[in-house]
Image (tube, rainbow, N blue to C red):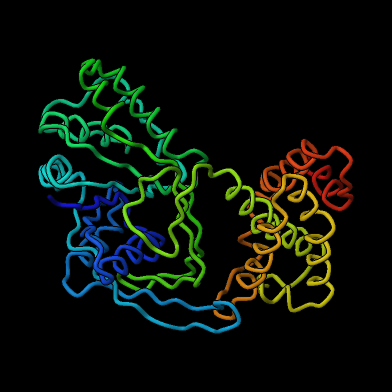
Amino acid sequence: MTRRIIQFGTSRFLQAHVDLFVHEARLGGQDIGPITVVKTSKDRARSGRVAAFRRPGGFPDRIQGYRGEQIVDETVQVTSVDGALEADVDWLSLTDQFANDAAFVVSNVGDRGYEIEDADRQSSPSPGKVAASFPAKLLQLLLARYEAGGRPLVILPCELVPANGTVLRRQVEDLGGLWKTSDAFGQWLKESVVFTDTLVDRIVSAAIGPIGAVAEPYALWAIRGKSAPIQHPAVLMTPDLEPIERLKLHILNLGHTVLAEIWTKGRRPEKETVKEILSDPMVREQLTALYAEEVLPGFAAHAMEAEARKYVGVTFERFLNPFLEHRIADIAQNHAVKVQRRIGAFIEWAKRADSGLQMPHLVVLAAAYA
């Protein structure tokens, strides 16, 4: 029985994340894949990627940066993808593979990819027509799978949406109600289709044309529950994603936002990068002290000091990646929103565990954007 993965999204992130992990798992003898990549958008500019995915030989992923104290600069030729489809053009082929061959589904369709267009809310598509939005396409394909016998399926969204699997399931179920799908289908959807919450983390800094990517050594695919498609050093199965989300949001992302504040207020070079700003001893000392004196005590209050201390070390490795050109100007976009989500939310979370915690610098920064 096939263990094919249907991947919705052609992004360079997935090329250096799921596609690479599956490639390495297959090399290690694991029975998983291959992958069919699906372009869901109408963006014609990405059609070139589809054609490139169809060529034999795979594509390169270049991994550059620190792994511990060692510099890594290596290229892997990824061969886990054996086909590519455009949803609007290759719908019959996609439906056949989804209904009969898929064991897992992964997706990365962008921050607004779960939105449902008005046309899809009005009624289900007529036979032969393809729905406009991703959740509606997914519902169409799930209906086809149910009608083809209804083998169980695991769906692993990779969008940066909190509780992404839960949110996507709700969108599909709500749309099923609008389309008046049968009670029997609804029961099958609940019992046989697993929508799993996941968290992904890897900086993919550049594309290699026409497909391929440049990425840092650090990588994480945290999956709630026990539905991981592969065993891999970067794949973590966990009953609870919140501690991992807190580490990423309130250490890595918080650090980025603090650096963006220093860059903005300090009138620093327009094209300054993360590694360049941290080459300034005063900035490096300021961020190090902030982690030690205000961030780590907050994690300690939630009995997470050891994990947080280790993650701070990994975070500095990532910040100082000599190959990565991560501009502060890009990080500083939507700065006020990021301050509240990364810093204001941390203060609130930490004080829930210990109301007496002192975080003077973080409190001032959060108040400035309240």
> With respect to residue 27, does 3 lie above or below?
above
Measured as percent of width and height from the top left, residue 299 is found at 73, 50
Question: Residue 74: percent from the left, percent from the top?
Answer: 41, 82
**In the image, what residue occupies the spot 77% across and 54% down?**
295
Q: Which quarter of the image is occupied by the C terminus? A: top right
- Counting from the top left corner in percent of width and height, residue 3 is at 20, 52
Left or right of 290 on screen, residue 238: left
Residue 131 vertical placement versus 260 (above, below): above
In the image, taking residue 73 as reference, residue 154 lies left or right, namely: left
Q: Quadrant of residue 19?
A: bottom left
Determine whether 6 is above or below 153 in the image. Answer: below
- Residue in front for this viewpoint, 161 or 198: 198
Residue at x-position 14% and y-position 41%: 95
Q: Identify which residue is drawn at 89% across, 40% down.
A: 356
Between 199 and 130, the residue placed more toward the observer is 199
Nearer the observer, 281 or 91: 281
x and y, in percent, of residue 171 in the image: 38, 29
Residue at x 80%, y 52% (from the top left corner) = 297
Question: Which image quadrant is residue 353 in?
Answer: top right
Query: Does 92 sit left or right of 323 as displayed?
Result: left
